[in-house]
Amino acid sequence: MKNITTLKEFACTPDRFNGGHRLCPGCAHGMIVREVINATDDDVVVSTATGCLEVCTAIYPYTSWDVSWLHIGFENAAAGISGAEAMYKALSRKNKSFNPDKNVKFVAFGGDGGTYDIGFQSLSGATERGHDFLYVCLDNEGYMNTGGQRSSATPIGAHTTTSPRGRVSYGEKNRKKDLTMIMAAHGCPYVATATPGSKHWKDMAQKAAKALSTVGPTFINALSPCTTEWKFKPEDTVEISDLAVETCMFPLYEIEDGHKLTINYKPKNKLPVEEYLSKQGRFSHLFKPENRWVIEEIQKEVDRYWEYLLRREEAGV
Amino acid sequence: MATPKEMMTTWDSIQFGAVLPSFEDPKNKVRSKFNSFNYKVADWRVEKPVFNRNLCIDCDFCWVFCPDSCFEVEEVVNKRGKKQAKIVGINYDLCKGCGVCVEVCPTPIKSLLMFSEFVDNDDALKQWPKKEDKKD
């Protein structure tokens, strides 16, 4: 496990994810991917589900990856990486691996569409088979690559092109699927949430290092604010991720061995969710008088979930 | 820079095992023409960040939060004998001008500020805000 203590030391790592990709200015995907694959000194094999990251980092004839990278379909990033891992295991058993003196880590990246909805069965299958890989979900709460359709990660009240706001509708009506808990219920040895917030770079890098050094399927759910479809200014990406943690909309916790829950960051004074919602254009309609009740509902739901996490941590189950 | 069309190869001439090798020489880390490191996204930018070396405290926040990996760092050894990264400059070929680095810069007078694309870097450094004297 790579020891990550100070940023000054961490920044000496040579970048393995290059600039020149065509992600939007201020997109958090770049920050998350760089931190995750810099969190280990071993060789890395990456597979990426179709989504913003896959489309923007591999526009032929350019590639942004300095590591081995596997192009794969929308639904089978986890299946692809588990195949690569099984092949590596089989070859090293026969002493035929390419560089036997080096460790190889396997990482799959998927957007929330490729993880929550479309790629879920392959992720569930790969976890059940117990392959040694890390799956990172870059959760931008919708199908942002294709113009902002809703996914099962979209929170209540958000405006997307398939759950539009209007005179009758207040946006998305279903609550966000709690994928982190679902993955923990698979019995993964390590499951965590992370954000690219200004206080939390170390949290994310350490979680990635821990997940990569754990044997067995591991999962990180990383909130990735989307400037284009969440409708905020590109420079506010880090601030939005901070607010998501401070308002407890996206709490930072980790679950070991499927049950032992630890909350990594507890905000000193929990901010009301309005702080987070008002910064984003996709929630602007909620501040009309007739939609105010939706904000109260969201606040209630967030409080309930935070209470649940606190009690679960205290009980140690 | 070769245009993307000139760089494209047909399927019969693709190297076995890898479609796009990102390194020409993997041992010495010489990046190939297929690596997007050699692509320019500078024309996306309206405003550019300008870096003031004199105010920088080497916290490396800009390095970790830059989505385009455009901060160039140099490994130096500090007084205590530990290695640390020193920010040397900005790769303006890769910068898209999002402004995240300016937001996360923690110094009282920011060591990174956004300027119009047409302002020369030396002129920008002259226009830098000065420290205001405390008036009690």
Image (cartoon, rainbow, N blue to C red):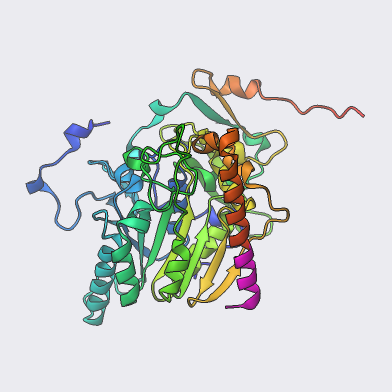
Identity of the residue drawn at 23% across and 79% down: A95
- Residue furthest to the left in view is B12
- Residue furthest to the right in view is B136
Residue A230 spot, x, y in % from top left: 47, 39
Q: Nearer the viewer, residue B26 or B62?
A: B62
Residue A258 visible, this angle: yes
Quadrant for the C terminus of chain A in the image: bottom right
Q: Is residue A88 magenta?
A: no
Residue A67 visible, this angle: no
Relative vertical location of residue A262 with respect to residue A229 in this rendering, above or below:
below
- Magenta range is A307-317
Q: Is residue A13 left or right of residue A308?
A: left
Q: Nearer the viewer, residue A183 or B15?
A: A183
Residue A271 spot, x, y in % from top left: 68, 49
Q: Nearer the viewer, residue A162 or B98?
A: A162
Identity of the residue drawn at 43% across and 37% down: A229
Residue B1 spot, x, y in % from top left: 28, 31
Identity of the residue drawn at 43% across and 76% down: A187
